Image: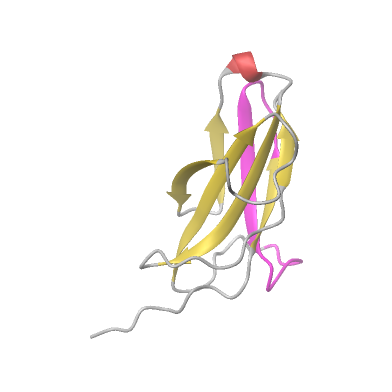
Amino acid sequence: TRTPNPPPATEPILNVSSPLHGTIRFVVHDSAAPDSHSHAKPAGYQGIELFEQIGGTPPVTSAGMTPLNIQTKTSFTFTEDPANSGKTFYYLARWVNTTGAPGPWSAVASVVLS
């Protein structure tokens, strides 16, 4: 039998922007290689577990945030409700292994929806 990878030891670095009206673009890097131009997730891991909060004060933990799907790609775009234009969106993420065991949290990333 194969042994699953242990929980990730590094956290993702989230770069978020709102380049087009109603969209939020994500580019994710691993903190083990923050200056790398590679967007590769750590080898053997499933992706990132992503949490979102719309408006309010910046979160300190994921408590009260909305969990989103696990993202397996490290560059992706969400389309948001245009009624939320001008609101601040906050995100937290962490790498997860193939059994869903999480690693440490990223820093909070925020963007104002254009």
Instruction: Estimate the x, y position of residue 16 in percent, counting from the top left.
Output: 69, 42
Quarter the C terminus occupies: top right
Closest to the observer, 25 or 12: 12
At x 48%, y 74%, the residue is 7
In this rendering, is residue 65 above or below 83? Answer: below
Question: At 45% from the left edge and 79% from the top edge, which residue is drawn?
Answer: 6
Rendered position, 23 above or below 35: above
Could you tell me residue 22's position as x and y percent? Answer: 62, 22
Q: Could you tell whether 53 is left or right of 101 in the image?
A: right
The location of residue 104, given as percent across then percent down, is 60, 66
Task: Tell me: 16 left or right of 40.
Answer: right
Residue 23 belongs to magenta span: yes
What is the magenta range? Answer: 17-37
Please name the colour scheme applied to the rendered image: secondary structure
Pinpoint residue 4: horizontal percent, then vertical percent. 36, 78
The stretch drawn in magenta includes residue 31:
yes
